[in-house]
Image: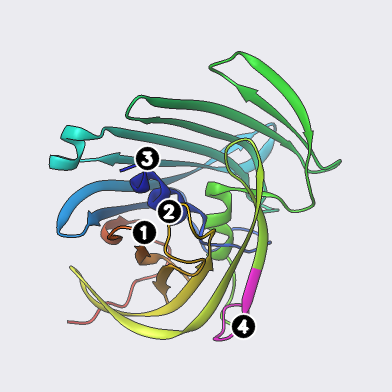
Amino acid sequence: MKKFSVLFGLLLITIISGQKLQNIQSGEVLRYRIHYGILNAGTASLTTLKTTYQGQPHFYVKGYGRTTGAVRAFFKVEDNYESFINYNTGLPSFYVRDVKEGNYTQHFETTFNHNNQTLLLTDKEKNNTKSLNSVVGIQDMLSAFYYLRSLDSTELKTGSTRKLNIWIDDEMFPFQLRVVGTENVKTKFGSINCLKIIPQVISGRVFKDKEGVTLWVSNDRNHVPIAIKAELAVGSLKADIDFYSNVKYALNFTK
């Protein structure tokens, strides 16, 4: 069931941009219900708060995912992610990944220096810190999510492809997504028109193929993720929006 945390991670990283985070407002909350086949496997949430970090305006974003119900009885997951994202540049300044998945634990903290493309990585469990080279425009798993949401409709039109580099654990991964069209998606709130996006992922280890994940985001200025589905080597995982509040623009659900 480590695939649960993979899906939660994908829920966080399937989005990009490179501009002011003007489509997000402080106090926004997004929550998702995650299913593994017919089972309620877990929940994931994202909260956003406007704050100041190192004298600059930032969003403090927290992501949290956990298994629930019968799945939690045999595989306990508690995944915590935090990021301070510069409001004016959309780039991360500080990032935390603190996960507990069964007997596996990991706690990394990363400080980004975008002026000279370096970062400081601290392994809290091993109590050591090292300096590493980075690249221009690097994102973490949370900041990447909020970047896509700042793109306008001309940058997320059907057929467009977006690329970026994402810092995940202790290394950088090239990432790409492709907008393949629009589709109406049914939710507990009603139906909503969405952009259908295919993120490119690594095949073989967990997913059936490198395009085994599909994401649907609201086809409006919010670009709120509505649903995500991952075809796994065994079975499938799906996350659906379960709650939202303080979204900047009204979501146009229809009955």
Query: Who is closer to the viewer here, 7 or 14?
Result: 7
Residue that lies at the very extreme toward the top in this rendered image: 127
Check whether the beta carbons of the residues at disc 1 and disc 2 lie within 8 A of each other: yes
Disc number lying in front (4 or 3) = 3
The mark that comes first in sequence, 1 or 3, is: 3
* On screen, residue 26 above or below 171: below
**Residue 1: quarter of image:** top left
The mark that comes first in sequence, 1 or 4, is: 4
Mark 2 lies on a secondary structure that is loop
The mark that comes first in sequence, 2 or 3, is: 3
Q: Residue 154 carries which label?
A: 4
Label 2 CA crowd tier, 10 Å (few <14, some 14–19, many 20+): some
Q: Residue 206 carries which label?
A: 2
**Amino acid on which the number 4 mark rests in the picture:** Thr
Which residue shows up at 64% across the image and 32% down it? 110
From the image, tell me which residue sits under label 3. Answer: 64
The mark that comes first in sequence, 4 or 3, is: 3
* Image x and y of residue 59, in percent: 55, 45
From the image, tell me which residue sits under label 1. Answer: 233
Q: How many marks?
A: 4
Q: Magenta segment, which residues? A: 155-162
Q: In this view, does 166 lie to the left or right of 182?
A: right
* Image x and y of residue 101, in percent: 36, 32
Q: What separation in Å lies between label 2 and label 3 (alpha carbons)?
A: 21 Å
**Amino acid on which the number 1 mark rests in the picture:** Ala
Q: What separation in Å lies between label 1 and label 4 (alpha carbons)?
A: 35 Å
Which residue shows up at 34% across the image and 65% down it? 229
The mark that comes first in sequence, 1 or 2, is: 2
